[in-house]
Image (cartoon, rainbow, N blue to C red):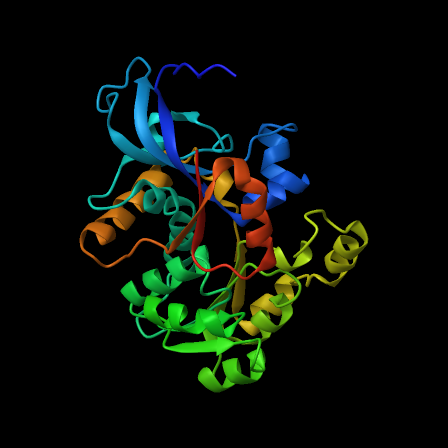
Amino acid sequence: MSVPEPGAGEVVIATEAVGVNYADCVVRMGLYASAREYVGWPITPGFEVAGTVAAVGRDVTDVSPGMRVFGVTRFDGYATHVRIPRHQVFALPAGWTMAQAAGFPAVFLTAYYALWELAHPKPGANVLVHSAAGGVGGALLQIGRIAGCRMVGVVGGPHKVAVARELGAEVVIDKSREDLWVVAQHAAPRGYDVVLDANGPSTLRESYRHLASPGKLIIYGFHSMLPRQGGRPNFARLAWDWLRTPRFNPLALTNDNTSVLAFNLSYLFESRGVLQEAMTRLLGWVEAGRLVAPRVTTFPLDQVADAHRALESGTTVGKLVLIP
């Protein structure tokens, strides 16, 4: 394929690193709603890249070829050259590698929007984070610590406990060795002010039951509905999980004094105000040393299938990044 040419207000980046997210696996399976809405199939996955500016379109005056940048894109990231609107491109943080930068925006924007925009926790709030050693989970722990919250992290194996502690979890629950909800109840007997859950039906019902009053359940994924091996959805299992996904009744929510909120980051890239405010604050925290880049594991771009298999296995820590 030919290298893309930038249109008005666009930047072409010669990629040196490409972030991998679980959403990319869902796109590959044909189950990602915004992929169907915006592109359809065939499709090139990829939400975040880092590299060098190769060309700029007319009206772009504050970015020039040769600059080291990173950015977010609605798909198409798994490529050597990516065309992105200027407002979705940012200068590389000082001292960061391309791989660190490529693994930053999707998970930290997700965490920021979930915790800072939707949850608004007050200092001292009890916050429960599922998948706390993953990309979004690790970002949530760090941002929660900045907000002055008491962070409780859930991980899926002993090798992830120390990672979650380092990132800000006061309590870490290893659900492979402990009863998740017994320990969660003990850690916050009056319930959680915020629970952040991307698991889906495997934990949503109990996540809601363990909210305080008032409390907020923030949903940003349904990972447990999708395969951990084989790479293809099991439609009978999907149907069963759809049936057992909790339906939240507005009357019950009112009586329980609780809220359920949900979002999909890929629908927010066009919201310039949201994106600019979030990235300005996040990069300010990076510059001040209050946020650290996620731990990165790299794969060559032509081994992307191995990266997806690793991510689907649930055993990875931090972010996976492809190197073209």
Q: Quadrant of residue 322?
A: top left
Say above or below: 74 vs 221. Answer: above
Q: Looking at the picture, tell me which residue is in the foreground, 147 or 177.
A: 177
Q: Looking at the picture, tell me which residue is in the foreground, 71 or 209.
A: 71
Say above or below: 6 vs 43. Answer: above
Q: Quadrant of residue 277?
A: top left
Q: Looking at the picture, tell me which residue is in the foreground, 28 or 272.
A: 28
Say above or below: 105 vs 184. Answer: above
Spot occupied by residue 249 in the image (x, y as percentages of width and height): 66, 63
Spot occupied by residue 16 in the image (x, y as percentages of width and height): 37, 34
Horizontal side, residue 76 vs residue 275: left or right: right
Q: How many marks?
A: 0
Tell me the residue at 56%/84% (across/down): 182
Horizontal side, residue 145 vs residue 18: left or right: left
Q: Quadrant of residue 51?
A: top left
Tell me the residue at 22%/49% (across/down): 284
Horizontal side, residue 174 vs residue 121: left or right: right
Quadrant of the drawing holding the C terminus: top left
Spot occupied by residue 82 in the image (x, y as percentages of width and height): 43, 26
Camera sees residue 130: yes
Camera sees residue 189: no
Question: Residue pushed farthest right?
Answer: 236
Spot occupied by residue 272 in the image (x, y as percentages of width and height): 36, 34
Horizontal side, residue 214 vs residue 9: left or right: right
